[in-house]
C-alpha cells in the first residue's frame, strides 16, 4: 500500500489565480490555449500548466478529473464549472476569491472577471474542482 501524497501547498492555488488574473484582457479565441487567445478550458489548461499541473483539455473533462470542492469551500485557484448551452458542463472559470472568477466568456469578449454570487453565472454554476 502506497502512502498518500502530501497535500499540495495552498500557494499553488494562489499562483493559479494570479496567473489567471494576469491574463485578463487577452482576446477570446475558440480552441485557443496560449497568450494569443483563449477559450474557457484553454485558459484553465494554460494557467495550470504554467503552475506545473497537467489537466484535461475540455471543461467537461476537467470537471470529471478534478477533485470535487464544495462550493462553500472554494479557494483561489479552484475551477468553477457551468452549464450554459447544454445539459453537460460547457464552461469553466478559475476562482480568484471574493465570489469572483476569471474566464474566457465567448467570441467578441476578452478574458474577464465574472461573479458567482449573483446574475447569469450564479444561475448556471454547477460545481467546483481542484487539481492543486
Image (cartoon, rainbow, N blue to C red):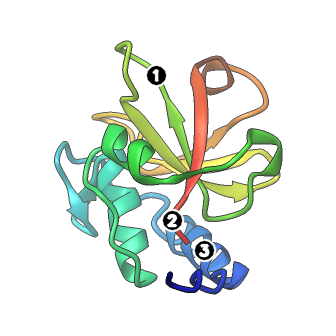
Residue ID at (36%, 46%): 40
**How many numbered discs sit on the rendered protein?**
3
Instruction: Name the residue tied to disc 1.
Output: 83
Compared with 51, 86 (above or below) is above
Which one is earlier in the sequence, the residue at label 3 or at label 2? 3
Q: CA distance from mark 3 to mark 2?
A: 16 Å
Residue 43, x across and y down, in percent: 36, 58
Residue 11, x across and y down, in percent: 68, 84
Residue 28, x across and y down, in percent: 30, 47
Query: Is residue 103 visible in the rendered structure shown here?
Result: yes
Compared with 60, 27 (above or below) is below
Q: CA distance from mark 1 to mark 3?
A: 25 Å
Question: Would you say the residues marked 3 and 2 are in contact, meaning their CB atoms lie under 8 Å apart?
Answer: no
Give the SS element for disc 2. loop
Which label sits on residue 18?
Answer: 3
Instruction: Name the residue tied to disc 2.
Output: 131
61 relative to 73 in the view: left or right: left
11 relative to 27 in the view: left or right: right
Q: Nearer the viewer, residue 7 or 93?
A: 7
Q: CA distance from mark 2 to mark 1?
A: 20 Å
Residue ID at (74%, 40%): 71
Amino acid at each position: 500500500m502506497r502512502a498518500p501524497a502530501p497535500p499540495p501547498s495552498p500557494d499553488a492555488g494562489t499562483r493559479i489565480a494570479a496567473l489567471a488574473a494576469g491574463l485578463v484582457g487577452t482576446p477570446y479565441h475558440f480552441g485557443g490555449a496560449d497568450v494569443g487567445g483563449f477559450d474557457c478550458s484553454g485558459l484553465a489548461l494554460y494557467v495550470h500548466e504554467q503552475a506545473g499541473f497537467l489537466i484535461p483539455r475540455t471543461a467537461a473533462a476537467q470537471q470529471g478529473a478534478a477533485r470535487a470542492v464544495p462550493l462553500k469551500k472554494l479557494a483561489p485557484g479552484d475551477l468553477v464549472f457551468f452549464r450554459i448551452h447544454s445539459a453537460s458542463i460547457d464552461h469553466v472559470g478559475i476562482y480568484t476569491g471574493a465570489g469572483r472568477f476569471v474566464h474566457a466568456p465567448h467570441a467578441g469578449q476578452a478574458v474577464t472577471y465574472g461573479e458567482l454570487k449573483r446574475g447569469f453565472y450564479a444561475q448556471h454554476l454547477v460545481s467546483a474542482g481542484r487539481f492543486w
